[in-house]
Image (cartoon, grey):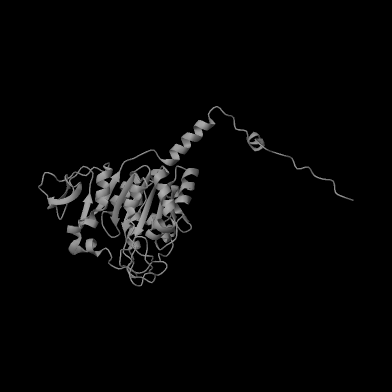
Amino acid sequence: MNEMTAVTTAKDWASDQEVRWCPGCGDYAVLKAVQRTMPDLGVAREKTVFVSGIGCSSRFPYYMATYGFHTIHGRAPAFATGIKLANPELDVWIITGDGDALSIGGNHTMHVLRRNLDCQILLFNNEIYGLTKGQYSPTSRIGTRSPSTPFGSVDRPVSPCMFALGSGARFIARGIDVHKSLPDVLKAAHAHRGASFVEIYQNCIVYNDDVFASFTARDFSAERQLWLQAGEKMLFAAGTKGIALDAERLVLKVVEADDPSVLVHDPKNRGVAAMLIELPEQGFPVALGVIYEDPAPTFESSVAEQNQAAAKGKTPDLQALVSKGQSWMVEKEPRAE
C-alpha cells in the first residue's frame, strides 16, 4: 500500500510522550481534534512536520507521532519556511499562540502570510500569557487585570484574523477548542494551497478562565455563533436570524432569516470578510469557520520556478562558482630556521 494512502487512526498520530498541560486546558481538545483529523487528510506521518515557537501550545510537536521542531520564541514561521523550501513535499503545520505569533513573532507571522508559504498556521488564542504565569498578551481585552497590568490593561487588543487579512493571508478561519466543527475547519485549512491561518479560541482555565463564555457557553452559543459555509446563507440562532448588508452605511446588520437581503457567504469577498471578522465589536455573533479564501501561487512554487529559470541552459560547475569574482591563493611561507 502506498505510504500516502496508508490507513491510519488517531492513535497512530499520538506520540508516546505524556501530555502535560494544566487539567482542563483547551489545548487537550485541540490536540485531540488534530489527531482525529490527520487520518482523513491522506498524508503520511513521515512526511508531516509540526513546528512551534514558545508557549503552552508550543509543546504540541512532542505529542504528535511526526517530525517536529520546538523552536524559539516567535520564529516558528522562519523555521517552517526553511523546511518547506528544502523539501516542498512535506506537510508543514505551525503551532503558535497569541503571544508567540503576535508579539515577538508578529514580524515573522506577517511575512509567512504575505509570502503565502504552503502551510497550516494554528494560532491558539487564550488572550493571556499562560506559560509565564498570566501576564496580559497582545490579544488581551481592555481592562484585563494581570501581574503585568494590575490596574487593568489600557492597550487596544490585536485582532488575529484582521492582522492576517492585513498581512495578505489568502485563507482565514476561526474555530473553538471544544467545538465539534473544529476538525472540519482543519480539513478546509489543509485543503487550501498556501498559508492557511486558523485562529482557535482556546480556554486557559488557570489564568483566563471563561473569557470566551459570552459566545461559547451553551446558553449563549446559538445566539452568538455564526458558522459560515461557502454558498450558504449567513444564518444563526437556530436558523431564525441572518446577516445582511446595510447598503447605506456599508456595515453588516442582523435581520430575520426570511429577509431576502440575507447574505450568501462568498469566501472570496475580502471586504465582507473584514466586516465578518469585526462582527463581535458591534455586538453581533462571532463569525466562525472559513471566513476568507482566495488562493494564489505559493511561495515555494514561485521560488522553484525562479531557480529553474535561472539554471536553464547552464552546466553546474562548483569550481567556477567558487572562483568567480575576487579570489586569491594563500601560499605557504617557508619556515624560518
Compared across the picture, whether 57 is left or right of 318 comes to: left
Residue located 42% across and 60% down the image: 58
Residue 237 x/y as whole percent: 15, 55
Q: Is residue 272 above or below residue 11?
A: above
Residue furthest left in the image: 258
Residue furthest top in the image: 313
Residue 234 x/y as whole percent: 18, 48
- Work out whether residue 214 or residue 8 is closer to the camera in this orientation and state it: 214
Residue located 38% across and 72% down the image: 147
Q: Quadrant of residue 323?
A: top right
- Work out whether residue 67 or residue 142 is closer to the camera in this orientation and state it: 142
Compared across the picture, whether 68 is left or right of 143 comes to: right
**Residue 155 shows in the view:** yes
Residue 29 x/y as whole percent: 32, 61
**Residue 36 shows in the view:** no
Compared across the picture, whether 245 is left or right of 308 comes to: left
Residue 116 x/y as whole percent: 40, 43
Q: Is residue 73 above or below residue 259?
A: below
- Work out whether residue 262 or residue 250 is closer to the camera in this orientation and state it: 250
Q: Is residue 318 above or below residue 333?
A: above
Residue located 34% across and 72% down the image: 151
Q: Quadrant of residue 101?
A: bottom left
- Split into 4 quadrants, where in the image is the N terminus? top left
